[in-house]
């Protein structure tokens, strides 16, 4: 040790030595920060992804499939996932309103590209390294619509060679599938099965399913239940199975590269009253019979998919400001659509209804690289405490 340092060590009080060391550390830290700023300035501004400023790297483009992703809660989900900056590829599925889907797609492009964007009729963009969106239309309860969803992914995003324009597709992988699309027959949307609003709400046990068949024999009308099973149960299983296949392929590519780990997520959107943790929701018998399969199967998917870096969850929104609730207000003869929300607030412990983006934020958390990746096999109630209230408990017959 040099003599000067030796004298300083032995004759300068210990407290002073600590202060000097602290000052030296701060000076070193300031120097490092200054050097970092100089290097950044010399390199120029970073190109950013579609979200909140994350820089685009050589990582594969993470793609999200979101059914019903252009309106209502689905729109809120797309907004939130886009804002994370972790996803640059989107396949958004809509039912019949193509104009609304295309308008929303243009809005997303405006957010990312501003006035510099160059978009064609199918929402394609010249700069798809920053954001690539494809729209798929059709009733998701039909297998043919689901075929189109995955044909779109395999053709436009999958890591197999080049597309017709010679654009390399090897930097994209399916990392999120959200089954959000749904409807309440005769209220929120049309369907391809010819099912219309019944004169009497179909319920279990009140005789509304019972009809008279040939020769005066009793016959049970299964058409409404079967439709919801196709829309929720069957469609969800189909979407999960095909998504998992592609996610597992992505996992294998990551494992072979030994440079990164795969992160995938599967999410279903359910409703109150579809599991035993809720009170019964009167009048939701038929839709709930389909959604309960989503909630049951998600635990099995979570168990089998965990080893591949994939988490699987269900989100159960409560009263949420969206197109669907506007339709419900119309059906109830409410001229002021806000009236239904004002009435609902009294049943919600937090005293307010959720926005579609609030549900989207939960999806973004579950599908991100943060703590949400450790949550799997759950049915998460995002309802302001609605499940704690007495809503839905039927009164005993007098």
Image (cartoon, grey):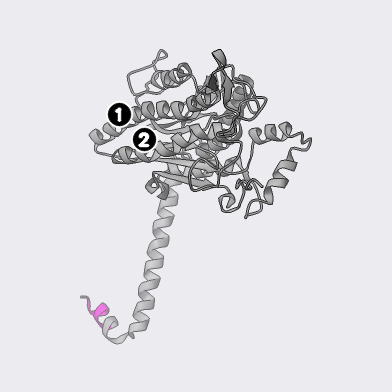
Bounds of the magenta span?
2-7
* Vertical side of 111 occupied by 224: above or below: above
Quick one: label 2 or label 1, which is nearer the N terminus?
Answer: 2
User: Looking at the image, which residue is at 73% across and 32% down?
Assistant: 330
Regarding residue 49, the answer to whether it shows in the image is no
Q: CA distance from mark 2 to mark 1?
A: 16 Å
Residue reaching furthest to the left: 1
Judge the density around disc 2: few (<14), some (14-19), many (≥20) Cα neighbours within 10 Å. few
Of the 4 image quadrants, the one containing the N terminus is bottom left
Judge the density around disc 1: few (<14), some (14-19), many (≥20) Cα neighbours within 10 Å. some
- 270 or 218: which is nearer to us? 218
Where in the figure is residue 381, as x and y percent of width and height?
A: 52, 47
- 3 or 298: which is nearer to us? 298
Where in the figure is residue 130, as x and y percent of width and height?
A: 47, 31
Where in the figure is residue 52, as x and y percent of width and height?
A: 52, 42
SS class, disc 1: helix
3 part of magenta stretch: yes
Check residue 249 in the rendering and tell me which mark sits there, or answer none.
1
Where in the figure is residue 136, as x and y percent of width and height?
A: 51, 20
Check residue 137 in the rendering and tell me which mark sits there, or answer none.
none
* Residue 295 lies in quadrant: top left
Q: How many marks?
A: 2
Is the residue under label 1 in contact with that under label 2 (CB below 8 Å)?
A: no
SS class, disc 2: loop
* Vertical side of 322 occupied by 138: above or below: above
88 part of magenta stretch: no
The residue beneath circle 2 is 59
Q: Is residue 303 left or right of residue 105?
A: left
User: Looking at the image, which residue is at 62% across and 55% down?
Assistant: 349
């Amino acid at each position: 040790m040099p003599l000067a340092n030796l004298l300083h060590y032995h004759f300068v009080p210990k407290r002073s030595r600590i202060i000097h060391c602290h000052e030296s550390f701060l000076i070193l830290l300031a120097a490092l920060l200054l050097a970092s700023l100089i290097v950044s300035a010399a390199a120029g501004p970073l190109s950013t992804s579609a979200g909140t400023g994350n820089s685009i790297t050589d990582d594969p483009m993470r793609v999200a499939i979101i059914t019903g992703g252009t309106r209502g809660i689905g729109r809120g989900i797309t907004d939130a996932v886009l804002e994370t900056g972790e996803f640059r590829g989107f396949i958004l599925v809509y039912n019949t309103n193509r104009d609304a889907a295309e308008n929303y797609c243009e809005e997303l492009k405006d957010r990312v590209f501003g006035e510099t964007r160059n978009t064609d009729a199918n929402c394609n963009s010249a700069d798809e390294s920053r954001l690539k969106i494809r729209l798929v239309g059709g009733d998701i309860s039909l297998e043919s619509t689901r075929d189109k969803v995955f044909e779109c992914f395999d053709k436009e995003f999958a890591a197999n060679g080049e597309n017709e324009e010679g654009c390399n597709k090897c930097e994209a992988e399916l990392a999120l599938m959200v089954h959000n699309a749904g409807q309440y027959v005769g209220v929120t949307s049309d369907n391809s099965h010819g099912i219309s609003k019944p004169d009497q709400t179909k319920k279990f046990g009140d005789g509304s399913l019972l009809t008279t068949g040939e020769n005066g024999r009793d016959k049970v009308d299964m058409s409404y239940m079967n439709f919801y099973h196709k829309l929720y149960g069957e469609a969800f299983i189909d979407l999960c199975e095909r998504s998992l296949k592609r996610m597992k392929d992505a996992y294998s590519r990551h494992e072979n590269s030994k440079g990164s780990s795969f992160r995938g997520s599967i999410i279903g959107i359910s409703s109150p009253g579809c599991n035993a943790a809720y009170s019964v929701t009167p009048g939701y018998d038929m839709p709930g019979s389909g959604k309960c399969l989503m909630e049951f199967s998600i635990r099995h998917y979570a168990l089998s998919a965990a080893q591949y870096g994939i988490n699987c969850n269900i989100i159960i929104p409560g009263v949420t400001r969206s197109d669907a609730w506007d339709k419900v207000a119309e059906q109830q003869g409410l001229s002021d659509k806000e009236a239904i929300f004002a009435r609902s607030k009294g049943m919600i412990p937090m005293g307010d209804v959720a926005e579609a983006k609030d549900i989207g934020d939960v999806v973004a958390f579950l599908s991100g690289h943060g703590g949400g990746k450790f949550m799997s096999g759950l049915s998460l109630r995002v309802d302001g405490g609605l499940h704690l209230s007495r809503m839905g408990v039927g009164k005993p017959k007098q």
